[in-house]
Amino acid sequence: MGFEEKMIMNGEPEDVSSSCLFKPDPLETVRQKCAETEHCVHTMERLEQCETRVGSRSATTEDCTEELFDFLHARDHCVAHKLFHSVK
């Protein structure tokens, strides 16, 4: 057995199934669910409209920071109420 083969075998678990290795992050799961709520969908639509408007102009100083912060605030507000119910 060569040195490279030993490194490969030592770097990767052999007997552990893939289902034991991956547990979804509860934060990401709750963020996805919250992003689908009515208020978050509305703020995401406003963000997408802004991005389309800004992207269609060749010279503009407008950016979509306000719309992005509105979406993130709405999503994180929802997450704050739901996250700790799923954490042990």
Image (cartoon, helix red, strand yellow):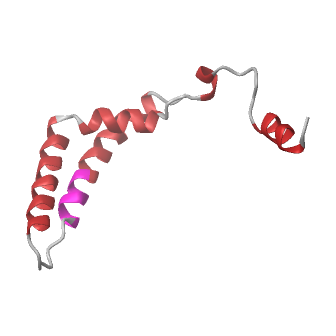
Instruction: Residue 53: say if magenta.
Output: no
Q: Give the x, y percent position of residue 6.
A: 86, 38
* Left or right of 9, for residue 60: left
Against 48, residue 41 (above or below) is: above
The rendered magenta stretch, by its main secondary structure, is classed as helix
Task: Write the start and end of the magenta stretch as one range.
Answer: 65-71
Against 16, residue 52 (above or below) is: below
* Left or right of 23, for residue 66: left
Q: Give the x, y percent position of residue 72.
A: 28, 52
User: Image quadrant of residue 50?
Assistant: bottom left
Against 15, residue 3 (above or below) is: below
Which residue is rendered at x = 14% and y = 74% of the image? 62
Q: Quadrant of the N terminus?
A: top right
Which residue is rendered at x = 18% and y = 48% of the image? 44
Against 28, residue 15 (above or below) is: above
User: Image quadrant of residue 59?
Assistant: bottom left
Instruction: Residue 68: say if magenta.
Output: yes
Give the camera-side residue of 45 and 70.
45
Q: Give the x, y percent position of residue 61.
A: 15, 79
Give the camera-side residue of 68 and 85.
68
Total tally of numbered discs in the picture: 0
Which residue is rendered at x = 57% and y = 29% of the image? 22
Give the camera-side residue of 31 and 53.
53
Q: Which residue lies furthest to the right in this view?
A: 1
Q: In which quarter of the image is the C terminus?
A: top right
Which residue is rendered at x = 75% and y = 29% of the image? 13
